[in-house]
Amino acid sequence: MSASLAAPLPRRGTGEALAGWMLTAPAAIAYGLMLLLPTLATIALAFTDYELGAPAFAWIGLENFGELLSDRGFAIALRNTILYVGIVAPLSVLGGLGLALLIESGTRGRSFFRAVFFLPVVSLPVAMAAAWQYLLHPTIGPLNAALRGIGIDGPAWLSSSDTVLISLAAIGIWENMGFNLVLFLAGLTAIPRELYAAAEVDGAAGGWERFRLVTWPLLGPTTLFVVTITMTRAVRVFDSVAVLTQGGPNKASQVLLYAMYEEGFTYFRLGYSAAITLVFLAIVLALVWLQTKVLEKRVHYA
Amino acid sequence: MPERSALRGLPRLLLLGLLGLLVLMPYIWMTAASLKPLDEIFRASLSLVPERFHAVENYGKVFAKIPVWRYLWNGVVVCGGILFFQLLFAVPAGYALAKLRFPGSGLAFGAVMLGLLVPYHVPALPLYVGFSQLGLLNSYTALIAPSTISVFAIFLFRQFFRSLPDDLIHAARMDGISEAEIVWRIVLPNAWPAATAFAIFSVVAHWNDLFWPLIVVNGTQYATPALGVLYFRSDEAGDDFGALMAAAVLMTAPLVLAFLIAQRRFIEGIATTGLKG
């Protein structure tokens, strides 16, 4: 956000106030109806035992949250989501950074490769999940066929509880890496060339030295942004789970949003589902809070 | 010398080519399988080229079994409707927050910042109940209405409009043009970069969305492309990977083609807009 305030226009008093209200009114109404009220209603729902189709509902205080604590399925969903984020975020950030450095290190084929790696970001996730299902199929999938070719018996990637989360995480990395790559490329082009020349004069001749002394510190704000945005994207994992595993086998790939979806729209336990939604919201808000905290403390050069 | 520098760049190109090929694997195999007959797919050979060309049968089956055009059309209606209302609501609000002084503008901007923190999954449950009470499940309204407000768009346009020169607006006021007209006739034409970037961001997000359509739509009439693939996968093509891959290719193609044509704008729209949020 830019800090400078625009100089105020010549005042036109009530006319200007009226215009301001009229121009914001449609957005304000839509905001109230589609965002504010339903969000408040979700918070309220979390403290009820409301079920769709039930004749009545009651306020039950923190009972839903108490149930969450003892719900093994929810504990697994939470653990899987954290694991998924823990795999997808660092690897897709490092992958994006590595690709950005590689692309930046030369001039030929820059926009071509940028487009290749960005392609998954614009591809219909449901359709690509179907493609992954074929690619990872235990018997007819090309991946296991290739593994057989070199004498390895590949696992049933998406239907074994040992490998399902890793497989979904691999798809997640594939989906997110191109996005991170483009953000890093924008950050890299913002680094002044003279700094590299200056580092060279100071004796930092090697590529690693230049990365350590110039690129990495100056990329700090970009990296922080990329890390948090990737984490918030990864916490929302839903499509690949809904299409490929429905949380299975035996809840081995159950994640927060899919658990929320199942409770709310398969079992119609809306109160309980709202409680899961609030846990999800709390995690997202915690990530944002963490970002602003780190931003205040560490990434200051100005 | 030029020969030496060409050789120097070679490892980079080779490595990028290899990694690029790896990222493209799902597309390559998806397309290859959509051209093969089922028995070839089940043989799990690593040959990409089909021995018997089966594209007509696979794609024909998709068109025969599911209303492909209907799904694509629904995708266009939903994305177009959402974008239309998002701009209709966000452009005037962004202008008012950027250039007008009025009581409550601080509160409105605070609401925008607060809204940016809330993922769209959070209001989903009460919205579902609301649409269900109104008998509006399974309709374009249910698909479009919740996304008509984009706090991100308001924020983006506010930032963009702040950098427009005040003289431009002042001159228009001197000519007696109303504030609403200023928005659509003077401010918006100057905001095309922000508007196209946001349009691409919005269309990609909603074309690809599965969560909300899965909740409010049942059956084929209002299904979006994402739902179409999901239905086809579970109903028609359990193990018919050739046809399933053909369906996946068909539903992915529109956005991917648009991306290949306007690559730079897409990347600016999706990623660079993200940087400012």
Image (cartoon, rainbow, N blue to C red):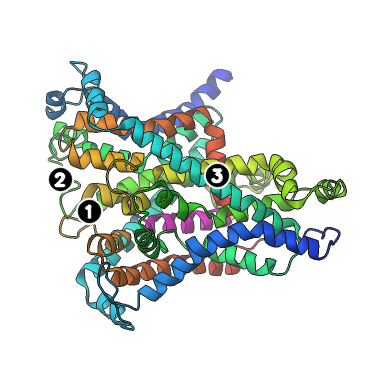
Amino acid tagged 2 = Ala
Magenta segment includes A225: yes
- In the image, the segment drawn in magenta is A220-238
Q: CA distance from mark 3 to mark 2?
A: 45 Å
Q: Tell which tag, 1 or 3, sits nearer the viewer.
A: 3
Drawn side of residue A2 relative to residue A155, left or right: right
Most prominent secondary structure in the magenta stretch?
helix
Q: Chain of mark 1?
A: A
Q: Residue furthest top?
A: B52
Mark 2 belongs to chain: A
Local secondary structure at mark 2:
loop
Q: Which residue is mark 2?
A: A156
Name the residue rendered at 15%, 45% in the picture: A155
Callout 1 amino acid: Gln
- Report which residue position mark 1 lands on: A246
Q: Is residue A12 above or below residue A119?
A: below
Q: Chain of mark 3?
A: B
Q: Secondary structure at mark 3?
A: helix
Q: Nearer the viewer, residue A235 or B19?
A: A235
Q: Is the residue marked by circle 3 packed among few (<14), some (14-19), or many (20+) residues within 10 Å?
A: few
Please give the count of numbered marks on the rendered protein.
Answer: 3
Residue at mark 3 shares a chain with residue at mark 2: no
A152 or B44: nearer the viewer: B44
Q: Residues within 10 Å of mark 1 (few under 14, many from 20)?
A: many
Residue named by callout 3? B84
Which quadrant of the figure has residue A1?
bottom right
Q: Residue placed at 25% from the left, 77% from the top? A: A67
The earlier-in-sequence mark between 1 and 2 is 2
